[in-house]
Amino acid sequence: MNRLIHDCIFRLVLTVAVVVVPMGSAMPAQPVEVQPFDPGTWSHLMASARVPTAVVFTTTDCAHCPATFERLSQVMRGRPSKAALIGVVMDQASATELADHPHYRLADRLYGFVDLPAAKLRFAINPQWRGVTPYVALISPSRPPIWITGTPTVAQIETWLATLAIR
């Protein structure tokens, strides 16, 4: 009798898991708020950084950018101290289009390039940057940014955070 009740409960739990879990994953994506990014935005981010901040310059068709957001988020969120993750989308995508890319939800803030030519904005950010994505700026309060083309390694992120005594 005890075994029969156990089997019935197990089957009920399994049925609920099979039915309910997929329903939760099919929920519509939450809206993504996209703030305008212009040359003044970069100056403001640099001047107002109070905590270590990783800025990922990305495009919606960047194949390596989701992994960049995931790695930065994982390493930075594993720390007791606060660090910020910011995404800057360089192509003209709407908030609805960006909601289809779940890695953008890992960012604390999300910006989109305004209607200026992208080359002009890139030059205002870093004259040596040629538009390759992902392009990452590791910003520390009162220090120049560390520029990384591609996805930073865990060691690069750890070294950056260690120099700021974030443990």
Image: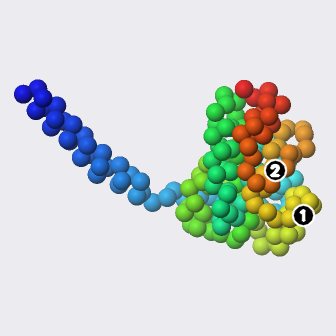
Question: Looking at the image, is 152 positioned above or below residue 50?
Answer: below
Please, what secondary structure does the residue beneath circle 2 have?
strand
**Looking at the image, is mark 1 or mark 2 earlier in the sequence?**
1
Left or right for 147, reference 109: right
Q: Quadrant of the N terminus?
A: top left
Front label number (1 vs 2): 2
Image position, residue 2 (x, y; %): 11, 26
Mark 1 sits on what residue? 123
Examine the rendering and report whether any part of residue 91 can be seen.
Answer: yes
Which numbered marker is on residue 27?
A: none
Q: Quadrant of residue 63?
A: bottom right
Which residue, as the protein is rendered here, is positioned at the far right?
127
Q: Between residue 99 and residue 73, name the one nearer to us.
A: 73
Real-space Cα distance between discs 1 and 2?
Answer: 16 Å
Q: Residues within 10 Å of mark 2 (few under 14, many from 20)?
A: some
Q: Quadrant of residue 64?
A: bottom right
Examine the rendering and report whether any part of residue 52 can be seen.
Answer: no
Image position, residue 111 (x, y; %): 71, 59
Please, what secondary structure does the residue beneath circle 1 have?
helix
Mark 2 sits on what residue? 148
